[in-house]
Image: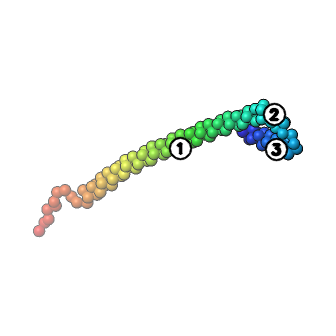
Amino acid sequence: LSTRLRELIESKRKLTLQIDNGNQEEVLSYIRSGEGLVLSKTIEKAMEDFEVRLTDEFAQVDLEEKSLKEQTIQRLLIADAAMLVIGIVLARMIFRSAMNRSNSGFPSTPVAREP
């Protein structure tokens, strides 16, 4: 695309110089032959190809971004579930420990006192 644009600019510069030097017939011959039109069509095709490549690149980036978001959400859900399980296990352990302490600190049968 860059090369074709340089060619177009160079050809227009040469045509302008030819007109300035009084060589209008050469410029008209160039126009009639369609060389300028061919170059313009080539540039147009190169632009279309460039746009397609850009569109494909952006589509790929969007796809990668969506995939990354999905992976992040899945990992966060797994981490949340793991924290919930750990919380339940710790709460049960603490509850059992507290129950064991309370049961061992107080005898279950009353002790008779002597007068």
Q: Position of residue 45 (x, y in %)?
A: 67, 34
Q: Of callouts 3 and 1, which one flags the residue occurring earlier in the amino acid sequence?
A: 3
From what the image shows, is residue 114 above or below residue 71?
A: below
Is 18 displayed left or right of 56 in the figure?
right
Q: Of callouts 2 and 3, which one flags the residue occurring earlier in the amino acid sequence?
A: 3
State which quadrant residue 51 falls in.
top right
Q: Quadrant of the N terminus?
A: top right
> Which mark is in front, 2 or 3?
2
Residue at 77% across, 35% down:
31
Picture colour scheme? rainbow
Tell which of 40 and 21 is nearer to you: 21
> Which mark is in front, 2 or 1?
2
Q: Position of residue 112 (x, y in %)?
A: 14, 62
Tell which of 41 and 95 is nearer to you: 41
State which quadrant residue 32 falls in.
top right
Q: Which residue is tagged 1?
A: 65
Q: Which residue is tagged 2?
A: 29
Q: Amino acid at mark 3?
A: Thr
Q: Quadrant of the C terminus?
A: bottom left
Q: Position of residue 15 (x, y in %)?
A: 82, 41
Query: Distance of mark 2 from mark 1, alpha carbons?
Result: 54 Å
Tell which of 74 and 104 is nearer to you: 74
